[in-house]
Amino acid sequence: MAITGQYINLDGIKVYYETNNGPKNPLGTIVCLHTAGRDCRQYHGIMDIFADKYEVVAFDMPAHGKSWPLPGNKAIYDYRVYGQFCWRLVEALKIENPVFIGCSVGGNMMYHIAETYPIKAMVAMQASTYIKAMGTAYGTTVDLLDNPYVSCQHSHWDFSESLMGQKCPPEAHDFIMWGVCQECGRAKKGDLSIYNNFDVTGELDKITCPCLLIRGTDDWNVPDHYYETAIKGLVNAEKVYWEKVEGYGHFIIVEAPEIVCRLIDDFLEGRMTGDAREKVC
């Protein structure tokens, strides 16, 4: 395994990141954002597959995995701050031509990052441009995740398992569920507060880079209309592609890294045809 990890001090926070030590490809360096409450290990499969073609960088957001929290033992609760942090890391690591990929809350963040920062391309998986659930009963359960009398792990055990696809390999299933066991309530609350109080739909016309949207169809939590809304708003993007992957779910980066890598490679190499906007709009 060619993956190596190290720390960088970013604005006073020790941030853990990993790279596959892949070659510098003019098509871009792939920068990965993990799902809510988890860490950069979710991208090990993709790092291994791309080891001979693309440099891949994945990192733990503050308060996740091996990264230190914000001052006061806090996580990030605002998607704008989340985006700023990601871009500061890209600048600190001197990454050129970043291709951002993300899943779940990381997938949502693709739209904000592409609207705001000069990235080469973006890949959004299990993502939405708009979710406003913090004022609902579900939002109340998110607020409880940091309560000392609530077990974050147990509260999300069945929920996380229900999001996986029927084709998810047993070893991927076990790793995803081990991720549930290791979740920190404060970090999970931060991510889900962002995920469920998110609206960048009105700024989608600012996105000009090529966009690839991927949906594992067994994920009941992220339906087709989330993607259709995004596609209708991406009027100025250079290209927009939407790929549905049958039998896989919310954690598609772990469930099916081979398929994800094939789609990303086809996307960056220009082998995809048929703009999604022509089908949806």
Image: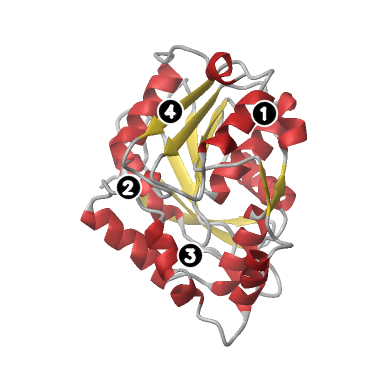
In this view, the residue farthest toward the right is 202
Q: Residue 243 carries which label?
A: 4
**For mark 1, what is the residue?**
118
Give the CA distance from mark 2 to mark 4.
16 Å
Percent coordinates x, y for residue 163 in the rendering:
41, 54
Q: Residue 60 carries which label?
A: none
Q: Residue at x 31, y 60 (%)?
A: 175
Percent coordinates x, y for residue 24 in the rendering:
43, 28
Q: Which residue is drawn at 31% across and 41% down?
A: 247
Q: In this view, does 117 lie to the left or right of 48?
A: right
Above or below 4: residue 120: above
What secondary structure is found at the residue carrying circle 1? loop
- Residue type beneath disc 4: Glu
Give the CA distance from mark 1 to mark 2.
30 Å
Q: In this rendering, which labeled residue sits more in front, label 1 or label 4?
A: 4
Give the CA distance from mark 1 to mark 4.
24 Å
- Residue type beneath disc 2: Glu
Q: In this rendering, which labeled residue sits more in front, label 3 or label 2?
A: 2
Is tag 1's residue or tag 2's residue first in the polypeptide sequence? 1
Q: In this view, does 70 lie to the left or right of 152?
A: right
- Mark 2 vs 4: CB contact within 8 A: no
**For mark 2, what is the residue?**
255
* Residue count near mark 1 (Cα–Cα under 10 Å), binned few <14, some 14–19, many ≥20: some
**For mark 3, what is the residue?**
66
Q: Residue at x 23, y 51 (%)?
A: 169
